[in-house]
Image: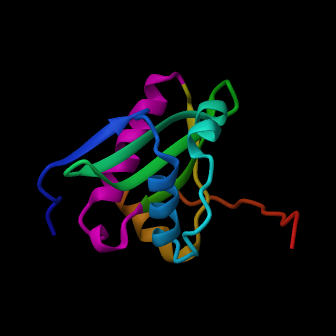
């Protein structure tokens, strides 16, 4: 499938908390009634973020947090359900990789579930590694 007409990627765009919260909820199949303070969180914790816009509507998003040194962490790769499987996620991740590299990081980490292996490994070039996870709340 082709990328939708008019798709534009914007780095460190001015985040509308309601729009990003809605996209996040729809992409992960969650209740969209809660608005997360995305703009504040991104400014405080993220090295960079990228939005995909189709006709000025936010249809995709990804960001990277970092340790202030050589390691960055890819988070929240999301694409609107009606826009998935068109290469938007791959474009977002590849653009994020370039931004993180340009910032001087040497490593970009991503954790993902097994069903996303083809996307992150085959489409985006990440190699699979072992990682640990500890749930801190119920």
* Left or right: where 56 falls relative to 51: left
Query: Which of the image's four quarters has the C terminus?
Result: bottom right
Q: Residue at x 48, y 32 (%)?
A: 100
Q: Residue at x 28, y 49 (%)?
A: 53
For residue 123, above or below residue 61 = below
For residue 67, above or below residue 52 = above
Q: Is residue 90 magenta?
A: yes
Q: Residue at x 66, y 35 (%)?
A: 45
Instruction: Measuring from the top left, give residue 135's x and y in whole percent.
Output: 84, 66
Instruction: Measuring from the top left, give residue 75's x and y in whole percent.
Output: 57, 51
Instruction: Measuring from the top left, give residue 30's x and y in whole percent.
Output: 57, 75
Query: Which of the image's four quarters has the N terminus?
Result: bottom left
Q: Which residues are magenta?
A: 79-104
* Left or right: where 35 falls relative to 135: left
Instruction: Measuring from the top left, give residue 41's x and y in whole percent.
Output: 64, 40
User: Is residue 126 at all visible to an observer of this figure?
Assistant: no
């Amino acid at each position: 499938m082709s990328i939708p007409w008019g798709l534009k990627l914007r780095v460190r765009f001015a985040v509308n908390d309601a729009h990003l919260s809605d996209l996040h909820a729809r992409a992960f199949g969650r209740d969209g009634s809660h608005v997360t303070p995305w703009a504040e969180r991104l400014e405080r914790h993220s090295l960079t973020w990228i939005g995909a816009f189709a006709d000025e509507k936010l249809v995709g998003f990804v960001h990277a947090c970092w340790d202030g040194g050589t390691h960055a962490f890819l988070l929240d790769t999301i694409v609107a359900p009606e826009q998935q499987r068109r290469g938007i996620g791959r474009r977002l991740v590849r653009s994020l990789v370039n931004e993180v590299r340009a910032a001087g990081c040497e490593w970009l980490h991503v954790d993902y579930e097994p069903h996303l292996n083809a996307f992150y490994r085959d489409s985006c070039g990440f190699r699979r590694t072992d990682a640990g996870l500890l749930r801190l709340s119920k």
